[in-house]
Image (cartoon, rainbow, N blue to C red):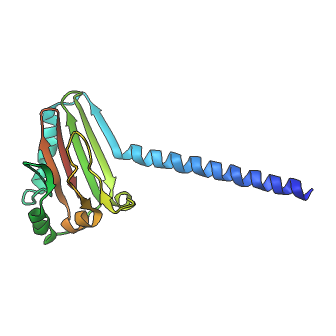
Amino acid sequence: MAKRRWVTCLVGVLLLLAVGVVALAGSCAYVVRQQVRVTPSSSLADFEHEAAGVLARFKDVPPLIEDGPAGPAVSRKALAARSKHGGAVAHMRILVFSTHEHKLVRLSLPMWLLRMSPDGSVDFKSDELDFDKVHLSISDLELAGPGPLYVRSHKDSHVLVWTE
């Protein structure tokens, strides 16, 4: 009788854990889905209009990542200039227009989610963007405050990354 009760309790705990894992996975998928918006059949003009509005809000704030001869790199000069202004940062936002697919992608990442990064940094590595040398910590982003991080127009894609 005691053995049966022990097995029943074990099955109940395992079932409760399974339901909890499914609920956690579902809620994570929901949160991520709410942060990504893809607009199909967009034009470059849509991207340029939205990007111009964002950059107009930060007209005197230099981007933290600049394209140089060796590829994109963090501008320590811009980081020092922006750290004087600072300010609270709540989101990192990314706006990308693909010229091949004619899609406009908007991604919003809350800073609390970025802070959960195991090494405390933002990993921008991408073959398309060539960000191998870019190493920005979450504290760098918060120190720099709101403003553009990276602006790029290329024949394949147009990218704007900023914090606010």
Residue 132 shows up from this direction: yes
The answer to which image quadrant residue 91 occupies is: bottom left
Q: Residue furthest bottom?
A: 84
Rendered position, 160 above or below 1: above
Percent position of residue 161, x then y: 20, 50
Viewer-proximal residue, 127 or 157? Answer: 127
Which residue sits at x=14%, y=65%?
79
In the displayed structure, does residue 153 sit left or right of residue 98? left
Viewer-proximal residue, 37 or 78? Answer: 78
In the displayed structure, does residue 29 sit left or right of residue 20? left
Which residue sits at x=10%, y=52%?
56
Percent position of residue 98, x then y: 21, 33
Viewer-proximal residue, 111 or 56? Answer: 111
Percent position of residue 45, x then y: 13, 34
Pick the quarter of the image with the C terminus: bottom left
The answer to which image quadrant residue 141 occupies is: bottom left
Q: Residue furthest front?
A: 70
In the displayed structure, does residue 23 sit left or right of residue 149? right
Total numbered circles:
0
Residue 54 shows up from this direction: no
Viewer-proximal residue, 133 or 51? Answer: 133
Q: Residue furthest right?
A: 1
Pick the quarter of the image with the N terminus: bottom right
Percent position of residue 153, x then y: 11, 40
